[in-house]
Amino acid sequence: MPKLNVTQLDQELKSGKVRPLYVIVGPEAYLARTATRRITDTVLGPDANSDSKQVYAGKEVKSDVLID
């Protein structure tokens, strides 16, 4: 999986390319929230409610939950 910055992510999403999985990491919480919001808006639409998605953050989730 290639590493993308927010600008590259935007370009991919605008072109209609959506990957099956995104792993968002880094020290900048604002950039992580921005990337998550942009992916969600592209895939589910800007009016999607919280029941339409699952977001897991850092130490709050165990790997077996993600694999299930």
Image: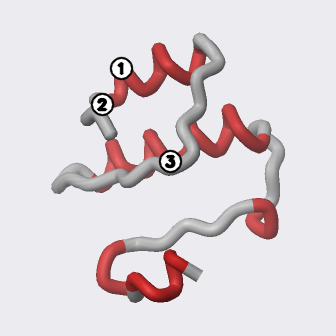
Residue 40 image position (x, y, % from top left): 64, 44
Residue, disc 2 = 4
Residue 45 showing in the rendered view: yes
Give SS at disc 3. helix
Residue 30 image position (x, y, % from top left): 34, 48
Task: Say which quarter of the image contains residue 37.
Answer: top right
Residue 61 showing in the rendered view: no
Residue, disc 1 = 7
Q: Which residue type does callout 3 highlight?
A: Thr
Q: Which residue type does callout 2 highlight?
A: Leu
Where 15 falls versus 10 (above or below)?
Answer: above
Disc with the residue nearer the chain's start (1 vs 3): 1
* In-front residue for pair 60/64: 64
Where 65 falls versus 19 (above or below)?
Answer: below
Select label 1 or label 2 by which is in front: 2
Residue 41 image position (x, y, % from top left): 68, 38
Q: Give yes or no for contact between labels 1 and 3 (Cβ–Cβ under 8 Å).
A: no
> How many marks can you see?
3
Residue, disc 3 = 36
Left or right, 39 with reference to 11:
right
